[in-house]
Image (cartoon, coloured by chain):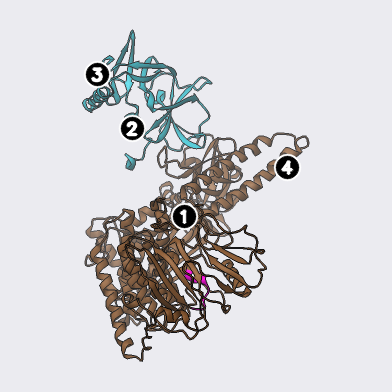
Chain colours: A brown, B cyan
């Protein structure tokens, strides 16, 4: 019954990466002076999940690192030690090491064993440092050991006998058991009746606590082979407890923190232990009704935890006064053994609880992550590969085209005779549009996915550079296409690093300039007319115009002192251009801004710079919202049809004679509401034969792009469509003035105009024409 | 260039060791042959959408089941035959290294198989097709076939089908 674990590796990798990311976010957000207990708990949970799952999958290296990390966090969590900056730093480094190890297991990088060992030592040292003050404090007196017989004879209380076989190779058992005991001590007293040995793999622990068995399950599930697990109640009279998550509640017991090694043995206490019927293998305990009810409630409410949440399904047969808590797995190895299960809501008073998995192999395979039991309160999300979503988007794109074709074909039929057909088509159109919108929204992700990495970047870099930096993020919920999210990350990182290194001054300089020592980097994102705009701003020294110009001259670029600021700033995006005095580790080699610019234009975006000396610099990146579909206006010029993305269109009008103004004898300006706009004639730009040339017979479309306006002269407006953007470059080349292509309702191809470029052309062409 | 093209041909045919299947088509009075594995389909000439400022032999783009495909008229490119578009005008859709390109020819003749020894090296001669793109001359009875390395031709800069950077 060997089970191939590798099929679950991918799940593990994804989960671990998520836990690592959330850990890092928490660490960066946490205030070491006054940590929020919730955050510390969340940190601990993240570390714990990684440890548990890496242990299960046999990634020992990751487990070792997380174990020490978890031990340290556990002490902080229990309030036994204050959180220090050093701990946060060490934890961040540990996170990096884990990422590296994770990547190594994926086969992407080679594992850095030295770093892993180094961080283990560092964390251990931190733990030891914690021990010192803890020892001097009036520590709880180590409980006297107690013979198991005494334990059993102790007066009323509850508890469980736990029989199980540890997962993983036998050489790791000792450590796993030690961990487990430490973990279980959170619930109450733990006694090791029989530790795992090579020849006798089954462990026997006894826990004395009034806690329900579910949290114990939760703990055990990570390290124990599920099939072998038996939890047997020791005694009766359980007080009903509130249902908590797995770790939140841990009634921190009397136990002092123990390093994992001394966690063996018998720990005491217990005021009240019931004379339990500790039968050899099967122990029956008596719960009262409320206990069972709460157990059930807990199951409904239990948070999905990691991916091993294996919620025992509780079923009851009212006739037989027994509640059968049986392990449910999706694989059907374990047949339920007891009684026909029935629905439970009302359970007869004294019931016998009993856990008994059907199969107990001697050396069973490690536990499989099984699908969660129904109704387990999942977060309601599923993992789907991007290819599937993309395929769906493509198909919907085709559907939109087909629908448009049908609508066009039906436009000639008699609306009275074919009323039903036309109604049906109208409905199809609505449905198609809705479907398209919902499919597109699948791909949308909040930009916080990108922004969340910057606190770390800023933190590391500001430490390295000795600058005080505060990072502000605005508009993190702004959504953008997933493919864009992935591609914008690197350019944005570069921009942030640039701002930090070149933009912000050192604290001394800032003080001298009368600014606060802490510089601010602002990351903001928002939507603007079909674009997503991302801004990286700093309140640093601003760009140095004179320096950029002199550098440009050194490099033999054609520059003049009369250039506009905008044009000067654009120079820094030329390949190889750097104004940094020294090449540092961070930047200064002059590669970067040009690459950023190239990447962003490859995404169909644009980059702008604004800067004011002494006040700061702002870099604005504009990207199309999605790469796939846009709202467009179709226009006719001569025999051709073009699409203008609707986001750029301000208005359209039929020009009158008087509106056209000439410069140097050429009519190239149009006066619209007191503003003079340059005119671009599409038929001239694209050399189209047979187009209207008389101003008064055509149409002017006022376009705005990149903060500039121009009027585009065309023959006629045709209509408004939602168009699916098709790449022209896939089989052809990039065409100036054309942003892409689409397929119209009649199956013909129409080209989508590159409005920013046409508007820019207006400014360049004008002087030539004049 | 010519040598390398021939060398490549020679190597290929030695490796395959058997006859090569070729699709033949006519441009004016000349008969050309191209590797059939590069051909995706053959279809009639549809209305195209012209592309601004493109060379005259690039007729424009068509919608081939959702894909935008550029159409090249080889008759204009090589100045042979009459560039008329009738219901019988044929477009050969090629799939070259993942790129789909259509080319207009006068007529598609047939599929033939030529053994390596039937393909002779082309002498350096003046022709409308640059000899750099000619793999050789095939002899099939009375017929002489100009075997064209269509992939190189279509991806060459003079066809202006590919961005400079992509080459």
Q: Nearer the viewer, residue B124 or A324?
A: A324
Vertical position of residue B134 compared to residue A282: above or below: above
Vertical position of residue B95 compared to residue A696: above or below: above
Chain to which mark 4 belongs: A
Q: Nearer the viewer, residue A512 or B101?
A: B101
Q: In front: mark 1 or mark 3?
A: 1
Same chain for mark 1 and mark 3? The answer is no
Q: Taking A338 as reference, is B19 left or right?
A: left
Q: Taking A452 as reference, is A468 left or right?
A: left
Let me know if residue A279 is in the magenta part: no
Chain part drawn in magenta: A209-216
Mark found first going from the N terminus, 4 or 1: 4
Same chain for mark 3 and mark 2? The answer is yes
Q: According to the image, label 1 marks what residue?
A: A482
Mark 3 and mark 4 in contact? Answer it, CB < 8 Å.
Answer: no
Chain to which mark 1 belongs: A
Q: According to the image, label 4 marks what residue?
A: A423
Chain to which mark 2 belongs: B
The circle on residue A208 is none
Give how far apart the Cα atoms at labels 3 and 2 are: 23 Å
Q: In front: mark 4 or mark 1?
A: 1
The circle on residue B158 is 2
Q: Secondary structure at mark 2?
A: helix
Give how far apart the Cα atoms at labels 2 and 1 are: 37 Å
């Amino acid at each position: 019954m060997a089970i191939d674990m590798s099929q679950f590796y991918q799940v593990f990798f994804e989960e671990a990466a998520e836990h690592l990311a959330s850990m890092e976010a928490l660490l960066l957000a946490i205030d070491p002076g006054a940590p929020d207990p919730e955050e510390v708990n969340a940190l601990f949970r993240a570390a714990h999940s990684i440890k548990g799952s890496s242990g299960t999958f046999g990634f020992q290296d990751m487990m070792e690192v997380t174990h020490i990390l978890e031990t340290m966090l556990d002490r902080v969590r229990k309030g036994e030690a204050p959180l220090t900056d050093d701990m946060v730093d060490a934890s961040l480094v540990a996170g990096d090491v884990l990422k590296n190890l994770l990547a190594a297991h994926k086969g992407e990088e080679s594992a850095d064993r030295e770093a892993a060992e180094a961080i283990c030592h560092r964390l251990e040292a931190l733990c030891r440092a914690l021990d010192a003050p803890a020892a001097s404090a009036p520590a709880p007196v180590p409980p006297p050991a107690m013979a198991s017989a005494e334990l059993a004879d102790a007066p009323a209380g509850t508890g469980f006998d736990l029989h199980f076989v540890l997962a993983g190779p036998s050489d790791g058992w000792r450590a796993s058991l030690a961990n487990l005991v430490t973990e279980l001590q959170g619930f109450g007293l733990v006694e090791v009746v029989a530790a795992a040995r090579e020849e006798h793999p089954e462990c026997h622990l006894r826990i004395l606590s009034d806690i329900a068995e579910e949290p114990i399950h939760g703990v055990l599930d990570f390290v124990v082979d599920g099939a072998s697990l038996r939890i047997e109640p020791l005694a009766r009279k359980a007080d009903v407890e509130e249902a908590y998550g797995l770790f939140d509640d841990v009634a921190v017991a009397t136990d002092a923190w123990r390093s994992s090694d001394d966690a063996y043995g018998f720990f005491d206490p217990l005021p009240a232990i019931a004379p339990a019927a500790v039968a050899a293998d099967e122990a029956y305990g008596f719960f009262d009704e409320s206990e069972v009810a709460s157990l059930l409630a807990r199951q409904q409410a239990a948070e999905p935890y990691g991916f091993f949440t294996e919620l025992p399904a509780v079923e009851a047969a009212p006739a037989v006064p027994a509640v059968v808590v049986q392990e449910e797995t999706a694989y059907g190895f374990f047949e339920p053994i007891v009684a026909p299960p029935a629905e439970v809501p009302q359970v007869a008073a004294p019931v016998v609880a009993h856990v008994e998995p059907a199969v107990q192999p001697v050396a069973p395979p490690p536990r499989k992550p099984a699908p969660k039991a129904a109704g387990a309160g999942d977060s309601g999300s599923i993992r789907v590969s991007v290819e599937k979503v993309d395929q769906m988007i493509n198909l919907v794109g085709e559907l939109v085209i087909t629908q448009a074709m049908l609508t066009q074909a039906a436009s000639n039929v008699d609306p009275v005779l074919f009323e039903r057909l036309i109604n049906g088509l109208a409905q199809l159109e609505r449905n198609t549009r809705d479907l398209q919108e919902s499919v597109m929204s699948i791909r949308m992700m909040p930009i916080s996915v990108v922004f969340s990495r910057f606190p770390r970047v800023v933190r590391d870099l500001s430490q390295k550079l000795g600058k005080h930096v505060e990072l502000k993020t605005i508009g993190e919920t702004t959504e953008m296409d997933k493919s864009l999210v992935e591609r914008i990350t690197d350019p944005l990182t570069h921009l942030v690093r640039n701002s930090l290194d070149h933009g912000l001054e050192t604290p001394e300089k800032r003080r001298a300039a009368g600014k606060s020592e802490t510089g601010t980097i602002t990351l903001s994102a928002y939507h603007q007319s079909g674009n997503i705009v991302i801004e990286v701003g700093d309140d640093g020294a601003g760009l140095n115009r004179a320096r950029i110009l002199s550098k440009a001259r050194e490099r033999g670029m054609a520059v003049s002192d009369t250039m506009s600021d905008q044009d000067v700033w654009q120079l820094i995006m030329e390949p190889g251009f750097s104004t940094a005095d020294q090449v540092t580790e961070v930047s200064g080699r002059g590669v970067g801004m040009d690459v950023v610019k190239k990447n962003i234009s490859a995404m169909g975006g644009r980059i702008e710079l604004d800067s004011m000396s002494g006040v700061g610099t702002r870099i604005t990146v504009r990207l199309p919202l999605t790469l796939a579909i846009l709202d467009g206006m179709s226009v006719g010029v001569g025999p051709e049809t073009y699409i203008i993305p609707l986001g750029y269109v301000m208005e359209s009008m039929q020009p009158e004679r008087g509106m056209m103004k000439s410069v140097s004898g050429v009519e190239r300006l149009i006066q619209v509401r007191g503003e003079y706009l340059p005119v671009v004639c599409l038929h001239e730009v694209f050399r189209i034969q047979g187009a209207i040339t008389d101003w008064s017979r055509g149409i002017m479309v006022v376009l705005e792009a990149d903060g500039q306006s121009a009027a585009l002269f065309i023959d006629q407006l045709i209509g408004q469509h939602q168009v699916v953007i098709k790449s022209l470059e896939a089989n052809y080349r990039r065409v100036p003035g054309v942003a892409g292509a689409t397929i119209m309702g009649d199956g013909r191809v129409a080209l989508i105009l590159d409005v920013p470029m046409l508007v820019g052309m207006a400014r360049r062409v004008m002087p030539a024409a004049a | 260039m010519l040598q390398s093209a021939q060398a490549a041909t020679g190597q290929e045919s030695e490796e395959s060791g058997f006859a090569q299947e070729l699709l033949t088509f006519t441009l004016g009075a000349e008969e050309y042959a191209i590797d059939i594995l590069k051909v995706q389909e053959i279809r009639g000439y549809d209305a195209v959408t012209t592309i601004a400022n493109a060379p005259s032999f690039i007729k424009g783009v068509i919608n081939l089941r959702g894909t935008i495909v550029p159409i090249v008229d080889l008759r204009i490119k090589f100045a042979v035959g009459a560039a008329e578009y009738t219901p019988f005008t044929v477009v050969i859709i090629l799939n070259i290294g993942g790129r789909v390109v259509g080319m207009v020819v006068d007529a598609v003749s047939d599929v033939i198989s030529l053994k390596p020894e039937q393909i002779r090296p082309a002498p350096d001669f003046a022709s409308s097709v640059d000899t750099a793109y000619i793999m050789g001359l095939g002899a099939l009875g009375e017929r002489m076939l100009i075997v064209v390395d269509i992939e190189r031709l279509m991806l060459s800069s003079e066809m202006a089908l590919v961005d400079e950077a992509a080459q």
